[in-house]
Image: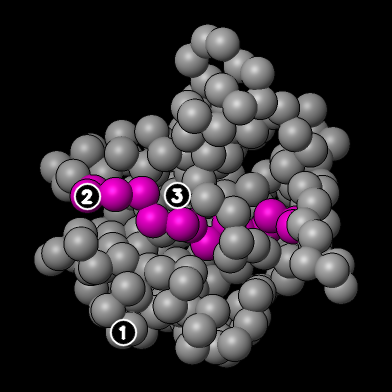
Amino acid sequence: MSNLSGLVEIPARGGKAHFVDAGSFIKVINTHGEQVVDTWAFDAGDASEFMSMEATRATILKLRPGVGDTLYSNNRRAILTVTEDTSSGIHDTLMAACDRYRYGLLGCTEYHDNCTDNLAAAMAELDITVPCTPSPLNLFMNIPWDSEGGLAFEAPLSKPGGYVTLRAEMDLVVAFSACPQDLLPVNGSLGKPVEAHFEIHSQS
């Protein structure tokens, strides 16, 4: 069920989801560099259990997971483990997925593609309704912090072709959004959101 033949595109400004068997590996590729990929994981049999950034931070005592770190669900169960990272290693666990309200606060008066809607659409393709939008693991997103606790939005430091590999610790559904943020420097110098890719296989 998990294995995919070749790369799967996460469309620019859009989302994609796929079932993943426990023990399989998910390789998320920043194809062009500087593209943030919001990442979620849900128990394959119960979408009310999902990867939780809050539970993960409390367990690994880090703001930024690295190779060897396990991410946890809202039920405190291991759900994904980072096994390889050829990107900058700079990722974010703090920022919520963008939504129409966020773009409203940024002055956007018309509909703007957003990660919340991308998640819902990607899961709907698998006939799954998510009960909420969990805070994602924002792969490749650069949110530095200072000694006073201040945060900033800065351009990603990843290069084209950099990737992160995650091992599924349970049967799950993984979902991605190529973040459509173009009002802040979240997606760097590219000038506009672009596609990313992933692949799923049984060996790292």
Q: Position of residue 119 (x, y in %)?
A: 37, 42
Q: Secondary structure at mark 3?
A: strand
What's the magenta region?
A: 130-143
Q: Amino acid at mark 1?
A: Arg
In the rendered structure, which amino acid carries the disc numbered 3? Phe
Residue 20 in view in this figure: no
The amino acid on which the numbered mark 2 sits, given as a three-letter code, is Pro
In three-dimensional space, the C-alpha distance between marks 2 and 3, rounded to whole angstroms, equals 17 Å
Residue 77 is labelled as 1
**Residue underneath mark 2:** 131
The kind of secondary structure element at disc 1 is loop
Residue 40 colored in magenta in the image: no
Structural distance between the alpha carbons of marks 3 and 1: 21 Å
Of helix, strand and loop, which mostly describes the magenta segment? Answer: loop
Q: Which class describes the residues within 10 Å of circle 2: few (<14), some (14-19), or many (20+)?
A: few
Q: Which mark is residue 176?
A: 3
* Image spot of residue 53 (x, y percent): 48, 69
Q: Is residue 49 left or right of residue 8?
A: left
**Residue depicted at 41% across the width and 69% down the height:** 52
